[in-house]
Image (cartoon, rainbow, N blue to C red):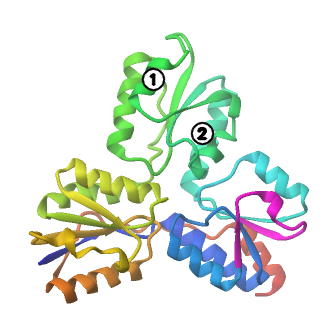
Amino acid sequence: MKVLLANPRGFCAGVEMAIQTVEQAVKIVGTPLYVYHEIVHNRHVVEGFIKQGVVFVDSIEEVPRNATVVFSAHGVSPQLRHDAQQRGCTLIDATCPLVTKVHMEALRYARQGYHILLIGHAGHDEVVGTVGEAPGAITIVESPEDIAGLPFSPQDKIVYLTQTTLSVDDANRIITAIRDRYPQVKEPPTEDICYATTNRQRAVRELSPQADLVLVVGSQNSSNSVRLTEIAGNAGTAGKLVDDASEIDHAWFVGVDSVLVTAGASAPEHLVQQIVQKLVDDFAGEVEHATVVEEDMSFNLPVSLRVLARSSGK
């Protein structure tokens, strides 16, 4: 069986930065270290940190007063930052800079009197944080069907923004529906869907026709990983989302001569390699590497973490 290994895959620059932030914070602050929401949406990453003494919380009230708290890669609202400061917490912000960009756009357009149509999944951590920047000026749009029920007129000032981890195809369908109803809609100055999401989706879209099955390494709550399985299906190849090698079902491979392996932006590479090794061992897999685009993006660790490191001498 041919095993086609997609590149790019796995960790993006934002995830790398967020994980390194927690690793360094554990060394500087010690444990328990509190992290608001899962640092990234991957079960193995989260469980690994829990074993080290990291405590993930869903409410800032769960963080003891005057403790250190890390904000996840998905970003948080200004109100939550304020609440944490009121508790005397030391804040370390591991928000992906590309998410911060969308936050700043939302704030800027709200101040300019625009109503913002935020294309994304209601309840997703990133969307919750973005809405918090201007809650009275943002409407979440999840599908083209949502557009018909919007109360705005062709004379209203409207702009659209997008969650960074959406399917490019799905977002474009919604954007088309918005433009059809509101020709005056303003576009963001640059694309909001992040480079890593776009590149991983492009790789699956281009490579999946060469495979009988697509395996996406990632967790069920990882938006960008779920989108990769959907893109494979839309391209005509069945996609399966797996957290690790233990979830592989041999029944999937009946009649399968080639499989494409990729990973969401929050999935560690060692999980990919374990799955590839299983395919080699169980199905006499022959591995081929397929590079669609090269990536060289990186982000600095948060300033607050670097200041903390200097003051502690660690």
| Residue drawn at 41 percent across, 17 percent down | 181
Q: Secondary structure at mark 2?
A: helix
Tag 2 residue:
105
In the image, residue 301 above or below residue 237? below
Highlighted range, magenta: 54-70
Residue 132 falls left or right of residue 232: right
Q: Indicate the quadrant containing the N terminus: top left, top right, bottom left or bottom right.
A: bottom left
The one of 128 and 240 positioned closer to us in this rendering:
240
Q: Residues within 10 Å of mark 1 (few under 14, many from 20)?
A: many
Tag 1 residue:
147
Residue 307 in picture, x, y percent from top left: 78, 73
Residue 242 in picture, x, y percent from top left: 36, 69
Please state which amino acid type lies under the numbered disc 2.
Glu
| Residue drawn at 50 percent across, 43 percent down | 121
The answer to whether one can see residue 205 in this image is yes
Residue 206 in picture, x, y percent from top left: 19, 56
Distance between mark 2 and mark 1 Cα atoms = 21 Å
Q: Earlier in the sequence, mark 2 or mark 1?
A: 2
Q: In the displayed image of the protein, which residue is found farthest to the front? A: 251
